[in-house]
Every structure is written in C-alpha cells, then in structure tokens.
Image (cartoon, rainbow, N blue to C red):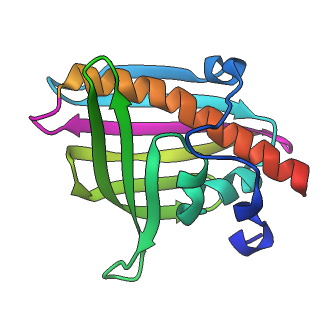
Amino acid sequence: MSNADLDLETLDLEDESLDLEPSLCSAVAVEVVPVGDRTRQISATIQIPQPSDRIWQVLTDYEHLSDFIPNLQESRRIPHPDGGIRIEQVGAQSLWKLKLKFCARVVLDMVENFPRELRFQMVEGDFKEFFGAWTLQPITDSSTNLTYTLMVQPSRMMPVGLIEKRLRRDLEVNLAAIYQRVEAIARQS
C-alpha cells in the first residue's frame, strides 16, 4: 500500500484545533531518562487498534504530518544529496507563562525499514543532538504498539528542563494525534 492509496489530505482534522480525547493522552506512556548533564532519552508508547501498515502510512506521509500534529508548523520532504529521504520540520508553540513563542527547526535524514522501524538523525537544526526512531510492534493482526524514542541534547541557549517538560507533554499529544489520524483513515477505508 502506498501513500497514494489513501486520500490523507481530505480528512476532517485541523492542525491547532485538533480535539484530542483526554483519555488518549493519558494512554501514552512516557519515560524520560537523563543521559549525561544535558542529554535526555525520551520514549513514548501508545497502543493503536490498527495494523502496523496503516500506521506506517501516516508516519511516512511526511508532507502532511503538520496537518494533524499540534505544534508542528511545517513538515516537508527536501532533496537529499545521496538520494535518501530528508525532511525539514519546524515546530512552534507559545510558552504562555513566559510570554514567548518557541520555534525549533530540524532537518532529518530518515531510514525506513518497512514495516517495523523508521529511524531519524538530525543533520542540521536547532539542537546539539537529535536522533531516534519510530518502532511499530504488532500485538495482533489488528493492533500495534507505536513507540517513539528520541535522544536529544538542546543547544546551550535552551534550558534542558524546559525542553524536557515540553517534549514529554508534546509526545503525549503527538502520539494521541497519530492515533486519531490512523483511526480516521480506517473509518474512511
């Protein structure tokens, strides 16, 4: 099944106004492990009652990720010098307590190992270190554990505690948004 097989653009989901079911966010298990002074390994997992190939379709539709993932302002595929998969993503959010708008940009090289793992490595961006993987582990033919694992080290200008807290919350919301997107596609099929 290719991305062209599903009409992902016509789904009735909007970026910032996405209504996430609170129970979905609480269904995401997040673990943060300090790895050195300013480096964190962050993992988030959610069980999605869909086969892994349907979830894969959503994860690898790089051009449309910002359509439904809150705080992902832009996601687009850009040329890779060696013919691989390279995407540029820009995340933005308001930090209301500090009255600041925080933006971060990453250029990621992607390695697709269909249908089980999607690895990424930052080659350019606003972090000192940013790499990890999406892992899809089938539980049954119609249910999959989706895990996102990130190793991140913010630049010296970014407070690590604030980044850790934001990423923890954002991963709950992002995995819940992916769950809802996959479910919406399943209903349209």
Residue at image coords 71%, 31%: 47
Q: Is residue 32 left or right of residue 116?
A: left
Q: Quadrant of the N terminus?
A: bottom right
Span of residues in magenta:
139-158
Q: In this view, does 46 lie to the left or right of 166?
A: right
Examine the rendering and report whether any part of residue 166 can be seen: yes
Q: In which quarter of the image is the C terminus?
A: bottom right
Examine the rendering and report whether any part of residue 113 can be seen: no
Q: Is residue 151 magenta?
A: yes
The overriding secondary structure of the stretch rendered in magenta is: strand
Residue at image coords 62%, 22%: 25
Q: Is residue 41 left or right of residue 43?
A: left
Residue at image coords 46%, 47%: 72
Q: Does the magenta stretch include residue 59?
A: no
Q: Position of residue 158 (x, y in %)?
A: 17, 32
Residue at image coords 81%, 36%: 49
Q: Is residue 76 above or below residue 91?
A: below
